[in-house]
Image (tube, rainbow, N blue to C red):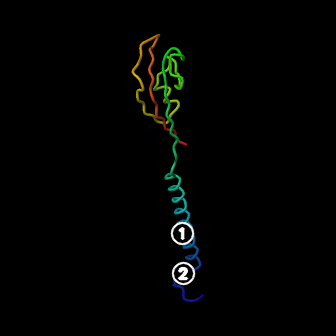
Amino acid sequence: MGKLPNWLRDENKRKLVGFICTGIAAVVGAGWALFVYLNESKGSIQATYQVCRGEYRNHCPANATWIPCSTTVAEWAKKECASYRQSEVRPPQPGDICGYVVVQIQCTAKQ
């Protein structure tokens, strides 16, 4: 067998070294797979909604998503978005049961 160190000439020690090296390779491979999984770049979908909350749909702008008085804008946004930002498009208008408010929702959803 050529010039092997004395400790490698023993078959049991060679098997032990092979077992340890295989274990190290398995741990390194699993660690790399976990790293890739946890650091995967996940894209996000962004959408902007104009939401009108009020008693009657016909009192809201035609391009706005209407929600009834029984639902708050925050409740609607939490159902539609993973996260959101809200800004007022026009000041609240009095009228009917709950008045009318038109807001812009910038919605981000994970893919």
Amino acid of disc 2: Leu
Given the current orientation, which residue lies at the most extreme left position? 91
At 52% from the left edge and 84% from the top edge, which residue is drawn?
A: 6
- Asked if the residues shown at circle 2 and circle 1 are in contact, with their CB atoms under 8 angstroms apart, the answer is no
Q: Secondary structure at mark 1?
A: helix
Image coordinates for residue 51, horizontal then vertical, percent:
49, 25
Q: Local crowd at mark 2 within 10 Å, few (<14), some, or many (≥20)?
A: some
The residue that mark 2 highlights is 8
Q: Secondary structure at mark 2?
A: helix
Given the current orientation, which residue lies at the most extreme front position? 62
Image coordinates for residue 104, horizontal then vertical, percent:
45, 29
Q: Earlier in the sequence, mark 2 or mark 1?
A: 2
At 49% from the left edge and 53% from the top edge, which residue is drawn?
A: 39
Image coordinates for residue 27, horizontal then vertical, percent:
53, 62
Residue 43 drawn above or below residue 25 = above
Q: Local crowd at mark 1 within 10 Å, few (<14), some, or many (≥20)?
A: few
The residue that mark 1 highlights is 20
Q: In the image, which disc is placed on residue 30?
A: none
67 and 50: which is toward the camera: 50
